[in-house]
Amino acid sequence: MDDITRDVYRYADFVLNSYLAITTKNRIKCFNNEILLFLKDTFDVIAQRWDVRIIEFKGGGDYVCLLLDYPHRINISSFIMALKGTSSVYTRKQFKDHLAQFPSNSALWERHYCLVSTEPKTTDGKSAQQIVDDYIANKKLKT
């Protein structure tokens, strides 16, 4: 049950995991390893502010893919817009010379993104059904 996030305001136990894929504007291959490391750190800071945990991060020359664990109370599309907007500003500022050699307007990211819900990733390898079964078995009635 350690992998279940507890929302004390709504008294809900939940595990919400989704894969997020975002691509660069016009799929321009402008990311190198240094930029990807910078993006990972930037995403981690932004995610903490939103109470979101990044479980996995991977990327290539023109994309980034994240596995997110997030509370049900946030608007996930607002989080994604904040993630893309803030990271775009910081990345363009930090890597101005490198990114100047690539044709683009001020946008780093495409407007669209792909978000796919997925089976929870727990540290002990439990499936979603096992998490639910454990919750039911361990839930005590309040008297």
Image: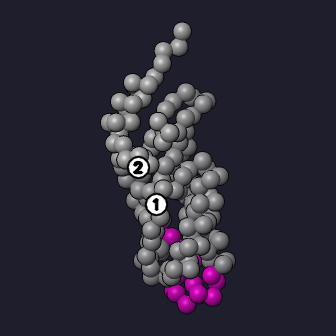
The amino acid at mark 2 is: Lys
Along the viewing direction, whichever of 101 and 123 lies nearer the viewer: 123
Q: Residue at x 41, y 46 (%)?
A: 124
Magenta part of the chain: 95-110
For residue 137, above or below residue 46: above
Q: Main secondary structure of the magenta part?
A: loop
The mark nearer the N terminus, 1 or 2, is 1
Label 2 packing within 10 angstroms: few (<14), some (14-19), many (20+): many
Q: Secondary structure at mark 1?
A: strand
Verify whether residue 100 appears in magenta.
Answer: yes
Q: Residue 29 in the image: x percent, y percent?
A: 45, 82
Q: Is residue 121 left or right of residue 83?
A: left
The amino acid at mark 1 is: Glu
Q: Residue 135 in the image: x percent, y percent?
A: 42, 29
Q: Residue 86 in the image: x percent, y percent?
A: 62, 64
Q: Residue furthest front?
A: 124
Q: What label does residue 121 carry, if any?
A: 2
Q: Quadrant of residue 130?
A: top left
Q: Residue at x 64, y 71 (%)?
A: 89
Q: Residue 34 in the image: x percent, y percent?
A: 56, 80
Marks 2 and 1: in contact by CB < 8 Å?
yes
For residue 77, above or below residue 40: above
